[in-house]
Image (cartoon, helix red, strand yellow):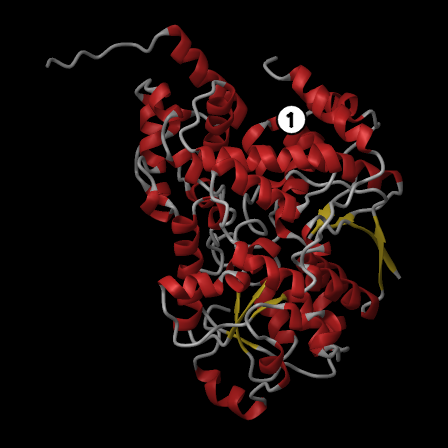
Amino acid sequence: METVLKTPGRSTRELILRLEQESGTRISLCYQCGKCTAGCPAALDMDYGPRQVIRLLQLGLAEEALRAGSIWICATCNTCSSRCPRGVDIAALMDALRRQALARGIVTDRQVATFNQVFLNQVRRFGRLFDAGLLMEYNLRTGQLLKDVEMGLPMLKRGKVRLLPDRIKDRKQLEEIFAQVRNRRGEP
Amino acid sequence: MMRIAYYPGCSLETSAKEYGDSTRWVARMLGVELQEIPDWSCCGATSAHSSDHLLSLALPSRNLALAEKEGLDVLTPCAACYNRFRAAEYQVRRDQTLRQEIREILGIDYQAGNHTISVLELLVDRVGLESIAARVTRPLAGMKVACYYGCFLVRPVSITGFDDPENPMSMDRLMKTLGADPVAWYLKAECCGAGLTTTRPEVGLRMAGEILKNALESGADCIVTACPLCHMNLDMRQGQVQRRLPMERSLPVYYITELVAAALGAEPEEVGVQRHFVEAVRYLKELPGEADAAETDRGGSGQA
């Protein structure tokens, strides 16, 4: 098959611009040296390494980048960004990719996205994190009922886990913060 | 008396209870008054910044704004909270439009005029190593310790900026002040695997294993950290790591404030060291002492 070079379409250009704005970085700065991937502690388990994710964006293959499993493996340790000789904020870009993937409903790793969703639901309802509830709901929703159950009793014995959530007083304000953010989402 | 707003965050009251207890103990001994932020709420951690940018700034800002009303800077012992607070104050401070937006979302006239500090900054910069040295009554003589900074305390440099992101040394200097013998190792600022130990155990446990392995290879008998997430991965999950990566011996993992408290005269149980998963009280009570420390000094911490 013949390879034809072409300019990315309008929706792709808009998506890339949005990713650049949100992460405050420029994709075109990257000269593909690979220092990010070399230092990434999670790269070993990624489909596309950080350098390749940037390359996909440079090539206008934004959809492919949004589907990369690596954006959900990135732990935001910021090693890549702090080492990049061209000042590309790769970690911020990974963050922006995760948010865009979420907004567009293309989530290739349900585990991490579900964890985040359950976590934030708790914050909205209680104002604080309720570990036991978080793990139970996460296990239920990901169908791994026995995950980490062996930690439960030892945590309890060590006084490291609450059986009931700790609620803040001004939960109304928390609801309001979440509602306000929801209303503003999608606006430039 | 130094006064500072105290943000325990969700972990210091549950899974990292000993970090909270030892922080309060150390603050009391060093004459730092901790004023807990009334009705504080969760910082949103990684879940917020992975899901919504504005939410990730609004959640820490609510707490910063509550402390600002009292005219106080904020102490966040949890490194993850610290990182989110610093990110929020940094962005809100330099962007007027964003500041207005956050004010509207919170319904509070937040100016981003106050600052967040970590326990490490409190001890090294505000209290000072000389004044800590003067209060040491039980030096941690002979303790071979790997000072583990992880990610959140030192990166991104633009928002943390108090130590070097590649070879931070402030915790090493603090440990020397306490009489311990920090080892030189290269994964001191590497990621512990963070939440991946929960969501992607095969990835997260491999990462935690790398840290433990490098500490062990470098001659450390224990690790010291300032992050509940790192502690959870290295201490609570050390058994899970060892099932994949057998270790010659287990490594106790201490919170920075537990070691300061011990050197200042606290019994380990007083500050909660018995709550760890890897037995950590015995090593602290039976430190090798001066002689052994002098003998191994030639290896020392060659990075200083």
Dot 1 alpha-carbon crowd within 10 angstroms: few under 14, some 14 to 19, many 20 or more: many
Residue at the outermost bottom position: B291
Give residue A67's position: percent from left, percent from top. 37, 26
Give residue A76's position: percent from left, percent from top. 49, 41
Give residue B296's position: percent from left, percent from top. 46, 85
Side (left or right) of B154 relative to A44: right
Residue at the outermost top position: A10
The residue shown at (52%, 34%) is A114
Give residue B9's position: percent from left, percent from top. 72, 48
- Mark 1, chain letter? B
The residue shown at (51%, 62%) is B234
Q: Is residue B110 above or below residue A75?
A: above
Which of the pair B46/A164 is nearer the observer? A164
Amino acid carrying label 1: it is Leu
Q: Could you say which quadrant of the image residue B209 lies in?
A: bottom left
Residue at the outermost left position: A1
Instruction: Tally the marks.
Output: 1
Q: Which residue is mark 1?
A: B54
Q: Is residue B110 visible?
A: no
Q: Quadrant of the N terminus of chain A?
A: top left
Which of the pair A152/B167 is nearer the observer? A152
Q: Is residue B144 above or below residue A106?
A: below
Which of the pair A20/B217 is nearer the observer? B217
Which of the pair A11/A72 is nearer the observer? A72
Side (left or right) of B255 relative to A142: right
| Element marked by disc 1 | helix
